[in-house]
Image (spheres, rainbow, N blue to C red):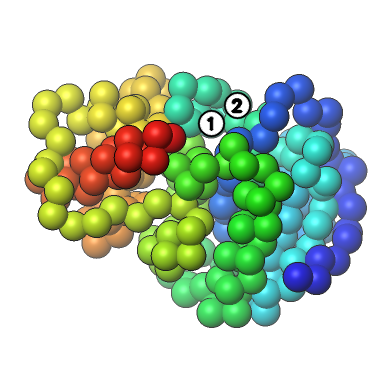
Amino acid sequence: MAVIDLPSPNHAARQAPVDVLVLHYTELPLEESLRVLRDDRREHRVSAHYVLAEDGAIYRLVPEDRVAWHAGRSHWRGRDALNGTSIGIEIVNLHGDRHDYPDEQIAALIELCRDIAGRHPAIVPRNVVGHSDIAPKRKVDPGLRFPWARLAASGVGLWPRAGAKPVEGDIQAALQAFGYPPAAEVTTADIVAAFQRRFRSAQEDGIADPETRALLADLLQQVDARCE
Ligand SMILES: [Zn+2]
């Protein structure tokens, strides 16, 4: 796996071990993304550990043992401010709801994610997340067209199987049990919509119908079986 080093000045010291991998789309073309993520004169400086071009080329901007600034306000599995404990990959795509991700880009992404998880075993499949999972409503990347099922088939992240018995009762509690944030800054409907954006892209209405509840039930069974 060839990696092109293109250092960004936007990083900080790590205070805690890495156990989350966050996937983003850039919303900008490659050259502009590399410029913005390496610019230290912006009011809100941003960066990521890696940028992944459409042709599969991998750029390393921040070393994994430093904190990059990609997640912002965020929450997963009871923890806030995930920059401190995560690695961030920015995938070049102008809008993942509208533009497909090229095959060669996804093949390179899978290789990169497996490589990263190999160095950080605490990044269990459950902790491979989209920006939209950890910042519901505020963020929508990597988008409805992101091929999560294909990644999961390669051991990167999770994907629900059909046919589970739907979760009953408090959907918010069940979403939080999987990792989603509490309904504080956003509503439970926003969080259901974020879940659907990731796992049920055909219906993104924020309504916890039986199908949505069944997918969540299967994911909870998977993490339980894996003792994650
Ligand atoms: Zn993002």
Residue 209 appearing in the image? no
Residue highlighted by disc 1: 74
Classed neighbour count for the residue bearing mark 2: other residues with Cα under 10 Å, few (<14), some (14–19), many (≥20): some
Q: Nearer the viewer, residue 216 or 207?
A: 216
**What residue lies at 43% left-to-right and 35% top-to-bottom?**
228
Query: Residue 171 location, x and y as percent?
Result: 20, 30
Q: Is residue 122 above or below residue 152?
A: above
Query: Residue 32 location, x and y as percent?
Result: 76, 63
Which SS class for mark 2?
A: loop
Quarter occupied by the N terminus:
bottom right
- The type of residue carrying mark 1 is Ser
Q: Which mark is residue 123?
A: none
Query: Residue 57 location, x and y as percent?
Result: 74, 73
Question: In screen coordinates, is 65 left or right of 55?
Answer: right
**What residue lies at 32% left-to-right and 40% top-to-bottom?**
225
Query: Residue 33 location, x and y as percent?
Result: 73, 60
Q: Is residue 104 above or below residue 127?
A: below
- The type of residue carrying mark 2 is Ala
Residue highlighted by disc 2: 81
Which SS class for mark 1?
A: loop
Q: CA distance from mark 1 to mark 2?
A: 5 Å
